[in-house]
Every structure is written in structure tokens, then in C-alpha cells.
Amino acid sequence: MRRIHDPRVGLPVSLPAVGTLLNEPAYAELVKEYGRERVVEAIREQVASEREGAADAAGRHAAVAAKLRTVAAPRLRRVINATGVILHTNLGRAPLSQAAIDALAVAAGYSNLELDLASGKRGERAALVAGLLTALFGCEAALVVNNNAAAVLLALTALCKGKEVIVSRGQLVEIGGSFRMPDVMRLSGARMVEVGTTNRTRPADYEEAVTPRSAALLRVHTSNFRVSGFTESASLAELAGVARRHGLLLLDDLGSGAAEPIGDEPTVAESLKHSDVVTFSGDKLLGGPQAGIALARSEQGVEAVKKMWRHPLARALRIDKLTLAALEATVRQRVTGHAEQIPVERMLHAPLEDVRRRAAMWSVKLAERGVETRLVEGSSAVGGGSLPEHSVATTLLAIAGPASRLSTALRLGDPPVIARIDKDECCLDPRTILKGEDETLIDAVEAAAMTLRR
């Protein structure tokens, strides 16, 4: 038992030893739940705070228990996306379909990940999804790695290391997390040759840059921004012409991976008509988990993908079993004509009348609970570095009250609801609320409103 002086009354106060507290039934229960080491650490922190006069011994057990709950609480939490941004980068971009979620459970146990069940011999994990990808996009070869940046890095390293790659200055993009295309190219060992200007690059600019050291032309789709006004760029067909005349590869970093036409986004099928190797994301517009996909249809492209497959870097960048399972399920849904079951697809194409009806239903239920709301016409964004100028009409539910405080209360709720502030009102967009989340959302809004009334 240690003694300190209470600064308030000048009298000595006894602080128990950690071992003494551990023998008390209440703390013994905490040891069962959190383990001895964690409990000892939490008790020492609490006693130290009491010694310094920063904490009260009366609430010791409650404080220790609270510390332990905070430490043990999962950092990755489910949130409700009411922002209207379909591919919200901060919220994990594309939510998975139920089929993809079910596939994760299969992959979590033992599976035939690298076993050919027919022959009993070792199999190749990527082959589980390669056939589906070639069927979906009508191509001849497919390779899957852990994300699209990795697919681009692998293509440049395996096919262009030590050689020149010609790219337009207007396409030297920076993607999320400050990753820049020049940095990726530098890491690959390829030498970047910039042509044209930021706003204008013609086919002749590529033609004039070709040398005996050139290996490829690279088109990088500016999926997260648009340049407008006095602009000009070479089409993929024109780039293919230059590449063929000089015996070069044409690589297309497509990014979003649109399986169907939407807005001004180029589709994978359109790219495959002209490019040797096309790379894009498994999430974003495809609607699956984060992955990098490389496809080829031309004879030269097929050989290029095989070379990428055999490169040692492919092993370091390979897709893990959980991602592979979710991607296979997502691609299978598209191949079998069930794309509408993929959340991203459903959100993009949900009729405005259905969205408005859903918002109106929330408004009625919240009114019954004393929460005042109103319907506001607005727009949803695609997000995730896709279709920057494309929006989808929606109906927002605006909650009466101080917008910033409401938004914070919703974000700190359980589960957290991420709202958006539109014209000084806290708004919820039904377009990005998943099926089955309606009642949970209504409860969360009521709880947030009550918090503000206290």
C-alpha cells in the first residue's frame, strides 16, 4: 500500500498495490475477459493518474474497465454511408454483394485455392477467376493482382524495364494517397518519355518520340479529373496505329473498369479493341473487392500477359484468397446476368422515384418519433476516382437542426452514420444506404436528435 498526499486536504491517501487489486473479484472478472497483462497495464495507468491527482479513486474500477474496452474495441467498424458518394474512398469504396460476402466465408476455411480437384495436382489460384474474366470481357488472357497500381507496376516492370515508355504530359496523374504515375514508372525501371503538353497531345507527338529504345505507348485514363476548354488528345485507335507501325506495345491504364457504358467513361471492351494490355480496378465500377486486373485480346497482348504472369514481381503482388473469392463471386454475377445484385450497380441505376419514395418513408417514420425533416432534390456522386463530372439525380432527407452538430452526433453514434452537409442542412442520401439498413438508420437519427436536445 502506497501513501500519497491528497492536495485538496493535505492528508495522506493510500493507493493499493496492483497485485492487491487483481485479487479483488471485480478485477478478476476483467482478467478473464481481457487477460492479465492488459488489466495490469490499465490498473497501473489508473493508479498513476490518481497519484498525480488527475483521477478519483472512487471511480477506479469503472475507469479501468473503460480503458480496457477502448483498447479491445475493433478499429475497423461498420458505418452507414448516407453521403450519396457511391464509391467513397474513405468508407472502403465499393460495398460487396451478398454473393461476394458468402464467398468470403468459403475462402476463410480450407478450399481448393491451389488444388485442381479433377486431377488432384497443384493448381493456380488466379485461374479460378481468369476464365470468368475472359468470358465477361471477350478477351484471351487475364491476370489478377492486389490492386490496379500493382497491375500497372507489374506491366511496366515485366515488359518495359530498361526501355522507354511514351506517355502524354496531360496523363501524368496523381491518384489517391499521393501516388503519382511518374513515381510508379520510375520504380518499374522503365524510362518515361513525356510528349505533348498538359492540354494538347497529338498522335504525331507520340510518333516523333519513338526511338530504338522505345518499348510501349502508355495511355493513362484521367478517371479522377477532366481537362476542358482548349484541349486535344490522341484517341486509343490513333495510338494503336502508332504502336503497330513501330512494333510497340500499347498499354492502357483504364482505372475504373466500366463493364457497361456509363457517362463518358471508356469501357473495358472498347479498350480491348485497340490495346495490347488493359489494366483496371476490381472495385470501383466493377463493384467487387480492391484488386488489379490485366486483360489482353491481341496475340501480342496475350504474350505480354504471360510474361507478366511469369515475372517474379507477380508473386509479391499476387491476390490473396479472400479477395480472390469475393472477386470471383462478383464477376460471376456479371457473367450470369445478375449485375443488379451488385450494390454499386444498383446504386448507380436506382430510379429516382424509388429513391424519393424511400426518403419519404424515412420522413414519415421520423416524424412519428418527433424528428422534423424535409425532402430536398439533389445529386449523388460516383466518387472513388470515377466519372468526376457525372452525377446521379437523388432526393435527400434534410434533418431540422444545427447541421454541424447533427452530423457529428450521427458520426459518433453506434453504428456511425456518415451524413453530408448541403446548403447548411444535415442531409441523408438514400442512394448509398444499403438494403436492410433503413430501420438502423432511423434509430440512429432519432438518437442523434435526442443527444442534441439534452
Image (cartoon, helix red, strand yellow):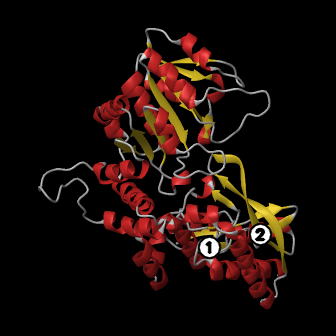
Q: Residue at x 70, y 72 (%)?
A: 355
Q: Compared to 186, does 46 lie above or below?
A: below
Callout 2 environment at 10 Å: few (<14), some (14 to 19), or many (20+)?
A: many
Q: Residue at x 36, y 68 (%)?
A: 105
SS under mark 1: loop
Question: x and y percent of residue 441 in the render?
Answer: 67, 77
Which callout, 2 or 1, points to the residue nearer the camera? 2
Q: What kind of residue is marked 1?
A: Pro
Q: Nearer the viewer, residue 93 or 90?
A: 93
Q: Residue at x 66, y 54 (%)?
A: 382
The reply to whether discs 2 and 1 touch (Cβ–Cβ < 8 Å) is: no
Residue 221 in sight in this render: yes
Query: In the rendered image, which residue does mark 1 sit on?
Result: 415
Image quadrant where residue 398 sits: bottom right
Image quadrant where residue 8 sits: bottom right
Give the side of residue 303 with respect to residue 69, left or right: left
Return the residue found at the far bottom.
Answer: 368
Disc on the earlier residue, 2 or 1: 2
Question: x and y percent of residue 109 in the render?
Answer: 28, 66
Q: Nearer the viewer, residue 379 or 453?
A: 379
SS under mark 2: strand
Q: Residue at x 55, y 58 (%)?
A: 94
Q: Compared to 155, does 351 lie above or below?
A: below
Task: Give the numbered dot on residue 111.
Answer: none
Q: What kind of residue is marked 2?
A: Thr
Give the side of residue 240 with respect to residue 176, left or right: left
Image quadrant where residue 429 sits: bottom right
Question: x and y percent of residue 422 in the render?
Answer: 83, 61
Q: Compared to 264, does 323 lie above or below?
A: below
Query: In the rendered image, which residue does mark 2 sit on?
Result: 395
Residue 58 in sight in this render: no
